[in-house]
Amino acid sequence: MTTYETTVLREGLGFGESPRWHEGRLWYSDFYRHAIFSMDAAGYEERFEYEVLGQPSGLAWTPEGELWCVSMTDQRVVRPKSGETVVDLSALSGFWTNEMVNDASGVAYVGSFGFDLDLMLREHGVAALMESPPPTTNLVVVGADGAILQVVPDMTFPNGTVISGDGRTLIVGETLAFRLSAFDVAVDGTLSNRRVWAQLEFVATDGMCLDADGQIWLANALANECLRVREGGEVTARATTSQHAFACMLGGEDRSTLYVMTAPTSDRFVVAEQRAGHVEAVAVAVPGAGRP
């Protein structure tokens, strides 16, 4: 197994999420600064991009170059530049909406928590999740015009999501099932043929990205690490981080820098008032591919 160790590029985030490499900069949401930011490749310059009062998460650009963002707490996808709603997903989301990716035609895939994880852990502890399966929720397929195209049920905390370079396969992390699940993507963006892409052992699959070898780098929300995983579940590389890892993205000029969003915990009752989040990075051997 190949091993790496990240370097902290930037401190002072509330909770960084949904890193994306776009137009030569790393873009990301910050839950508790309620805004979208970008920074240069070395982390020297952070730039405020847009405010999102409803707690920003998943980011995606349309084919026309318009940014969409998941507004978590009010369960919408919004256009941050104008504040307009693309789609209201409150009737289809179990608790808060979360991650999003879109395909080359602009069809977006949006997940949600399914339940209040922080509150459950605070009241009942990790044992509650181990003793019985957590509530499931939907993965919602949203057309480029904001119409709901499909609702995929029975997802266990659908989180980080990637689309293969040919656009034919979508892979989504089911965080609390410790697995990655794959779907075939039809021409209209709808999903079929659900299957297990990788079953892992006590790895809470969080934000992730795809590389040119078809392997996935994923943040393990239970540890200070990102793992590189081959289809079937073999872990081929590990990048250790200074704090728990919650999302990662391959970026930089040649897409061979693994950027990682880290924080002491994801518990909002602990970190919402802190500024302890980091952006960390390390150079890796295989560049990024696919979407995001």
Image: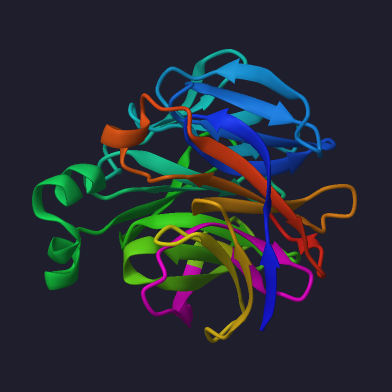
Residue name at image x 89 percent, y 54 percent? 254
User: In screen coordinates, is 197 left or right of 260?
Assistant: left
Residue stretch rendered in magenta on the structure: 192-217
Viewer-nearest residue: 13 or 142: 13
Residue name at image x 37 percent, y 44 percent? 266
Image spot of residue 95 (x, y percent):
25, 41
Residue 275 at least partly seen:
yes
Image spot of residue 288 (x, y percent):
77, 61
- The answer to whether 52 is drawn above or below residue 177 in the figure is above
Give the position of the N terminus as an image quadrant. bottom right
User: In screen coordinates, is 224 left or right of 188?
Assistant: left
- The answer to whether 72 is drawn above or below residue 20 in the figure is above
**Magenta span has 206?**
yes
Viewer-nearest residue: 169 or 234: 234
Q: For residue 234, which quarter of the picture?
A: bottom right
Image spot of residue 8 (x, y percent):
66, 44
Residue name at image x 77 percent, y 62 percent? 289
Q: For residue 179, which quarter of the picture?
A: bottom left
Residue 61 at least partly seen:
no
Viewer-nearest residue: 238 or 182: 238
